[in-house]
Amino acid sequence: MTLQGGLGPSLKAEALRDKPVDSLVATIHGGRPGTPMPPWHRFLSEDEARWIVEQLLAGFPESTSATQRDAAPGQ
């Protein structure tokens, strides 16, 4: 998973930084009609969608991978 887009725009933190958080949450929760982005409201609450946005803006998954790699014993 590269998050660099394919059917849609990149989900990397640098591509999302200038987007309003509420707009990103609405896109995840409600989808985007006429695009491949489906609504996730049947599976995620709005708070869970906001958490996903916060993780993406924080650099997930790169930030998590680096933390896990640095914390790995014997490395």
Image (cartoon, rainbow, N blue to C red):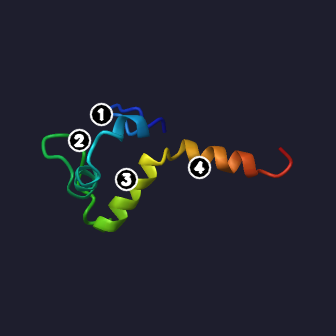
- Is there a contact, CB below 8 Å, between mark 2 and mark 1? yes
- Is there a contact, CB below 8 Å, between mark 1 and mark 4? no
- The residue tagged with tag 3: helix, strand or loop? helix
Residue for badge 2: 36
Residue for badge 1: 7
Residue 7's x, y, as percent?
30, 33
Mark 2–mark 4 distance (CA, rounded to whole Å)? 27 Å
Q: Amino acid at mark 2?
A: Pro
Mark 3–mark 1 distance (CA, rounded to whole Å)? 18 Å
Mark 2–mark 3 distance (CA, rounded to whole Å)? 18 Å
- Residue 12 visible? The answer is no
Q: Amino acid at mark 3?
A: Val
Residue for badge 4: 64
Residue furthest toward the left?
A: 34
Q: Give the mark nearer the N terminus: 2 vs 1.
A: 1
Q: Give the mark nearer the N terminus: 4 vs 3.
A: 3
Q: Give the mark nearer the N terminus: 2 vs 4.
A: 2
Residue at coordinates 77% horizontally, 50% vertically from top-left? Answer: 72
Q: Give the mark nearer the N terminus: 1 vs 4.
A: 1
